Image (cartoon, rainbow, N blue to C red):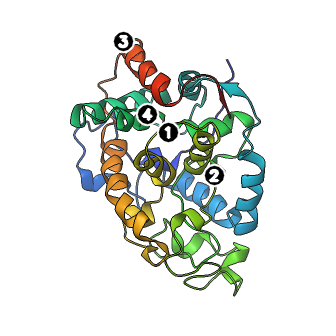
């Protein structure tokens, strides 16, 4: 088995400190000001915010959206995340697949009638499989944001990490709307490249039957400036606004279900394999 150290995952680093405080308050999550990983996480975002420009994102679309890297079933892809070892994270010492099942089980308890929602909880981070093909971690994990228009202040480390991003100085891109029309819809917006967009593209490429609400959750769950801070509403259309409550609902389970009470993955696998068979059947192209 190939083990990859993808470096600090900003989307995970400031979730509960599982070893020291199992009852962390919600307001203590996603603390980007203090903590043992702050230097490493800042470096991650500095690389991300320096390199994630419009040209870079278009290049990644060309590289990844043809889904010609490998073929495997969804459950195999989920379990392959255990090969992604973050040696810099002192708070999480269990495999990535546990977070997938924890999120899914949290949703299953709250929404027992929505099996597609449960499946979304299970697979939402599978796009991180890009790291197995040597994609740098700053192009895989972390919060996402639109490129091709002005970077909003709610982006993590906005003030001091975009200084070397070429688009920040380009008058065609650094205005409120940039290359976009008002209320054009997020589907027409280029997001910074990461695991959200990649998995969304894989699901669409393979004609998976997850409902549109679930696809929005997958595609925009890391878009914190939008779903948690209310920015970029000037780019949203009516459909985006209808889908926003679903993304917010998903975020509660993604962010707050990580605990030291680890699920029995082998026991849960048959149920979730049945959901995969229903919505993402067979061998998929990645």
Q: Is residue 36 visible?
A: no
Quadrant of the drawing holding the N terminus = top right
- Element under label 1? loop
Q: Earlier in the sequence, mark 3 or mark 2?
A: 2
Q: Earlier in the sequence, mark 2 or mark 1?
A: 1
Q: Earlier in the sequence, mark 4 or mark 3?
A: 4
Q: Nearer the viewer, residue 37 or 79?
A: 79
| x and y percentages locating residue 284 in the rendered image | 64, 29
Residue identifier under label 2: 138
Q: Which mark is residue 92?
A: 4
- For marks 4 and 3, give the CA distance: 22 Å
- Element under label 3? helix
Neighbourhood count class around disc 3 (C-alpha, 10 Å): few under 14, some 14–19, many 20 upward: few
- For marks 1 and 3, give the CA distance: 28 Å
- For marks 1 and 4, give the CA distance: 6 Å
- Element under label 2? helix
Name the image quarter holding residue 39: bottom right
Q: Residue at x 33, y 52 (%)?
A: 29
Residue identifier under label 3: 267
Are the residues tagged 1 and 4 within 8 Å (C-beta)? Answer: yes
Q: Nearer the viewer, residue 131 or 72?
A: 72
- For marks 2 and 1, give the CA distance: 15 Å
Neighbourhood count class around disc 1 (C-alpha, 10 Å): few under 14, some 14–19, many 20 upward: some
| x and y percentages locating residue 243 in the rendered image | 38, 58
| x and y percentages locating residue 259 in the rendered image | 31, 32
Residue identifier under label 1: 89
Q: Earlier in the sequence, mark 2 or mark 4?
A: 4
- Judge depth for marks 1 and 3 and give the one in front: 3
Are the residues tagged 2 and 4 within 8 Å (C-beta)? Answer: no
């Amino acid at each position: 088995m190939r083990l990859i150290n993808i470096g600090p995952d900003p989307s995970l680093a400031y979730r509960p400190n599982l070893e020291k405080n199992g009852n962390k308050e919600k307001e203590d999550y996603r603390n980007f000001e203090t903590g043992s990983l702050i230097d490493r996480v800042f470096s991650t975002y500095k690389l991300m915010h320096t390199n994630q420009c419009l040209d870079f994102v278009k290049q990644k679309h060309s590289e990844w959206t043809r889904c010609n890297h490998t073929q495997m079933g969804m459950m195999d892809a989920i379990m392959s995340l255990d090969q992604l070892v973050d040696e810099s994270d002192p708070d999480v010492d269990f495999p990535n697949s546990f977070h997938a099942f924890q999120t899914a089980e949290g949703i299953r308890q709250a929404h027992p009638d929505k099996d597609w929602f449960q499946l979304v909880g299970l697979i939402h981070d599978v796009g991180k499989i890009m790291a197995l093909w040597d994609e740098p971690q700053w192009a895989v994990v972390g919060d996402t944001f639109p490129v091709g228009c002005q970077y909003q202040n709610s982006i993590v480390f906005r003030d001091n990490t975009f200084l070397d991003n070429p688009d920040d100085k380009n008058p065609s891109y650094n205005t409120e709307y940039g290359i976009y029309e008002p209320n054009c819809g997020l589907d027409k917006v280029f997001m910074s490249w990461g695991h959200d967009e990649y998995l969304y593209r894989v699901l669409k490429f393979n004609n998976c039957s997850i409902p549109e609400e679930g696809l929005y959750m997958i595609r925009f769950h890391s878009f914190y400036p939008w779903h948690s801070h209310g920015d970029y509403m000037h780019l949203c259309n009516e459909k985006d606004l209808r889908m926003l409550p679903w993304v917010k609902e998903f975020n509660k389970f993604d962010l707050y279900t990580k605990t030291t009470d680890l699920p029995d993955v082998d026991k849960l696998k048959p149920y979730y394999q049945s959901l995969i068979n229903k919505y993402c059947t067979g061998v998929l192209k990645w």
